[in-house]
Amino acid sequence: MSQTPRPARLVFFLTIFIAGLCSIVYELLISTTSGYFMGDSIKQFSLVIGVYMAAMGVGSYLSQFINDNLAENFVKIEILLGLTGGVSVPLLYFTFTRVTGTEYQFIMLGLTAVIGVLTGFEVPILVRILKEQFTLKSNLAYVLSLDYVGALLASLLFPFLLLPFVGTFKTSLIFGFVNVALGLFVYYFMTGRAGEKRKKSMIISALSVLLLFVGMGAGADRLLTAWEQDLYTSRLVFSEQTPYQKLVLTKNNDDLRLYINRIIQFSTIDEYRYHESLALVPMAAARHKKKVLILGGGEGLLAREVLKDPEVESVTVVDLDAKVFEIARENVHLSEVNQGALDNPKVTTVAADAATFLQESSEYYDLIFADLPDPSNDALSRLYSTSFYRLVHQRLGAEGIFVTQATGTFHTKSAFWCIFETVKASEFAHVYPYHTYVPSFGDWGFVAAAKYPLDLQNYNADYPVKYLEPDLVKSLFFFEKDIANPGDIEVNYLDRPVILGYFLEDWERWRKDKK
């Protein structure tokens, strides 16, 4: 067995490591982007992982038919893989607004399959290239261990560094560039006997792809702004990918809207209907109001309503994403709408997961509000489970009131009543569903609960409001026949998140096959 020169051996190891790193990053990029566009992140990640692994198997099988010029063919594969992976996210951004949802899904899976097949070629060909330098035992050990370590690094870099600080679009270009540059680098060591014509052709191809990435990188911000603008009907005034979600603010005259992962959170045209109903109906009936806890609501609009009551002494706002607090305070458009609520000395903001905060807290609150995103994925579904509501129950004073937003009563009726049934099953003795019409959302539901009977319909408060009045509040507790409790709704448990199925099935009935 010949002894491989030390530089060449380092190139082999570096190649294996970076190849494993790049391939996993592509998989994470496509999954994250599709989860952002299509909404159901679990489904998107599952599809990408399944298709990617199956395609890798296909690539591994097909590698047996490559018999000549292994090193040169490996470099070609790296260039193709870099090109496909590098343009994957830009291509998904470009196509999403121009095709139907079904067509987008096929394009996404097609890209995943191509990347998987090309990745499947890598390990078998590398093993064969190295067979004369190492024993098969050592060969497999080196290749597989370095490939797996590269995958581990990718899985750590992506959520903690690449996604929050670089973003999906630029990350795909960077790793595509790295993949192609790696191919050129390896080419220098592995293809010394290749003909000049073949060398020139491959170098030109690789450099062309690298220039493409440089050009797209230089125009990335402009391209992203244009493509993201296609997703929204109004002008973008803020857009940022945080470690947790995509935040977008749009503005059209007096209509400011916040979107999280493309799902609208509020419109200033009618948000007061939602926030007054969520906050002031229970506050008017509360016996004690000194200590208030808001779970979610980091944009400050619910805190604005809570602060209308002079009896409130402290408000703790818990939101997972610190960036939401930042834009609520610093974005001139949003701070004007929330009236500087988060800068009020009574208000304390905590960047934490709602369930974790409740588990670790030893405080008791007079009022707890859950203004959390809809249960559109598995992670959010746990915040609508019996386990979560029991945590709320533990942190609620003996005469405290808990209220949660509970999705739409018409478009997502099953999900709404699932929340109602789950709160009932979570040690609360008295549970009260109510709803109001918010034009931007439709008919929207809330569920209030307490350890003692409440008279929520007897609203006689004199808060400064745009919407609520005594006769209206009485009507909020009446449910028409077509949105009444169907009576066969299951409870949502932490280990069996039925609410996710209800929510997705409800929306599927209304979803048009576009965007």
Image (cartoon, rainbow, N blue to C red):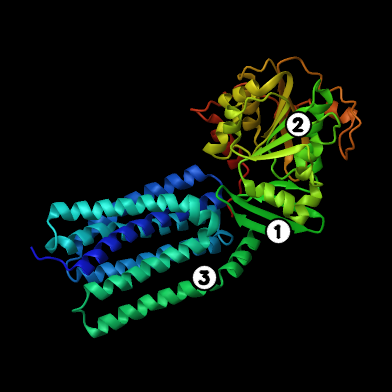
Under mark 3, the amino acid is: Gly
User: Image height check: is 270 above or below 55?
Assistant: above
Closest to the camera, between mark 3 and mark 1, is: 3
Helix, strand or loop at label 3? It is helix
- Identify the residue position indicated by label 3 in the image: 217
Q: Which quarter of the rendered picture does the N terminus lie within?
A: bottom left
Name the residue that disc number 2 marks: 435
Residue beneath disc 1 = 233
State the residue in front, 122 or 368.
368
Q: Which label belongs to residue 374?
A: none
Tell me which amino acid carries mark 2.
His
Query: Badges 2 and 1: C-beta atoms under 8 Å apart?
Result: no
Hey, which quadrant is residue 358 in on the image?
top right
- Above or below, 504 against 449 in this view is below
**Residue at the image point whose x is 76% and y is 15% from the top:** 453
**SS of the residue at dot 2?**
strand
Which residue is more in the foreground, 428 or 149?
A: 149
Q: Sequence order check: which comes first, mark 2 or mark 3?
A: 3
Kindly give the residue lying farthest to the left in the view shown: 1
